[in-house]
Image (cartoon, grey):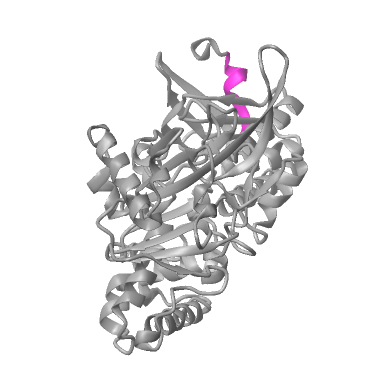
Amino acid sequence: KMEQLKAEETTFDVVIVGAGFAGSSAAKKLIEKGYRVGILEIKNRVGGRTYSVKTSSGHRIDLGGQWVGPAHTELMKLIKQLDLTLSPQPSNGLSLFQYKDGKPSTFDGSSDLLPPNPQDDNKDQSEYKALIDHFDKLAQQKPLPISYDKITFHSYLYDQLTSFTSLMAKQAYEETFDTLITGTSRHYSLYFFLHFLQSNQGYAQLIDAAGGAQEWRVHLGTQQIPELLLQHYLSLSPSSKLFLSTTVKSIDQISSAPFVTTTTSLNDVKFTSKYLILTAPLSLYPTISFSPPLSHGKQFLAEHTKMGSIIKVILLYSTDFWTTLSPPLCGEMVIVQSSGPVSLFFDASHFDIVTTNDDGTKELKQLKGLVGFICGKKVNEWRGEAKKQQRREAVLKQLLDLTGDDRVNDVVECFELDWGNEEGSGGGYFGIPKCGAFFEAGEKWREREGRVVIAGTEVSEDFMGYIEGAVRSGQRAAEEVIGLLENEKKL
């Protein structure tokens, strides 16, 4: 029990706050170098903003982060090291597009971005492509002009890009990124948007399945990556420990060595270390007491960052009926300016699995399903236990309007998770700074605070907001700490 821990059991070379992908990646590197690591996790599980749950069929589905793309090279290395199997994102068939609750149109999502409309000489489609080119080009600037942080993305899109006259194209582009960022473009700045676009290598890499960020899922769930990593590396370092359900109350660097005061259901426990890696979301920094206080830039940014809003809904079926329609659909359904809750659907079907029954017989079980995303401002409208039945009915109505097939109601099993209710996350996918926060914070907000090094997908220069960004940030933080520890050995 934690209240019975001896001092040597709470003293480590490095304390890591958070057991998600950043924390587990940092722990891996540190343990490989022979350092004793203590990992403190507020949740009763590891995985951070990934969360894989078991279905009645025995499959594991992802209620949190799930996709892997070929550009996610560090994540791919972990998957290979752990000998995990990748399940390709189903993409055979056409995509659907619906605008303002109107009649859905089919389009080839592998080549087109919006359905062609010959009646207006494909103006919407051509302007959408022009918007992609415009913002991809803006995002290539290095460094990005900090003046871009003084204007919201929404204001720039509608007030300054007057040469673009297709309202549908602008709204489709805006809602695409409100869905990806899980925020509202009236809140975040042009600078933040372009940083997100730049760090993820542009529009195509963010949107595409084949060759893009949505190419694969991890068979039996993404959460098993940090689970297996920590299981393996903690077994190699018996003096390193993982502490679940442990809330960090304070981080004190005024003493000769930094220590962390945590709280459990019973009492406070002090952990001491030479260095600390903080992987908690920026928006949670104000819940921790820092001595000395954080630098102004980091504190300001933390106080003006709020987590995105996302409810993930997964509907499981006995068949993937959408692939049998005429024409067959791939499951991707893009919904713009809708009165319904969901802005995007994808096929959530996975590999078949073989299970063993109580009598010893083998049974092949399939998992067919659709995943829907309720994002940004829609979450406030639809969240809450009291609206659960209303929310589910609205999602099914959207699917019926989109597909025209009554089989949408033949749901075998339904899962949903509002990430705003998740302790230690407070939302998803990542923190969104208010317009102007970067300008006030200055350029040095990512830097180390004494013996505290920050990590997490929000602070990653590359693939910010994605699992890959979390992995890279954890690796970078560990490498920085290892360098500092090695230098101290030489003194």
Foreground residue, 325 or 258? 325
In the picture, the quarter occupied by the C terminus is top right
In the rendered structure, the answer to whether residue 268 lies left or right of residue 471 reads: left
Can residue 448 be seen?
no
Foreground residue, 360 or 348? 360
Residue 339, position in %: x, y? Answer: 24, 56
Residue 348, position in %: x, y? Answer: 53, 46
**Which residue is drawn at the image coordinates 52% and 37% (left, top)?**
318
Foreground residue, 382 or 289? 382
Magenta segment: 6-13
In the rendered structure, the answer to whether residue 110 lies left or right of residue 361 reads: left
In the rendered structure, the answer to whether residue 77 lies left or right of residue 388 reads: right
Furthest residue in direction front, as rendered: 326
- Indicate whether 451 appears above or below 206: above
Residue 7, position in %: x, y? Answer: 57, 17
Can residue 114 be seen?
yes
Q: Does the magenta segment cover residue 382?
A: no
- Indicate whether 141 appears above or below 205: below
Foreground residue, 6 or 190? 190
Residue 68, position in %: x, y? Answer: 62, 53
- Indicate whether 325 appears above or below 451: below
Q: Does the magenta segment cover residue 10?
A: yes
- Indicate whether 24 appears above or below 463: above
Numbered circles on residues, count: 0
**Which residue is drawn at the image coordinates 42% and 79% (left, top)?**
128
Q: Quadrant of residue 434?
A: bottom left
In the rendered structure, the answer to whether residue 421 lies left or right of residue 224 reads: left
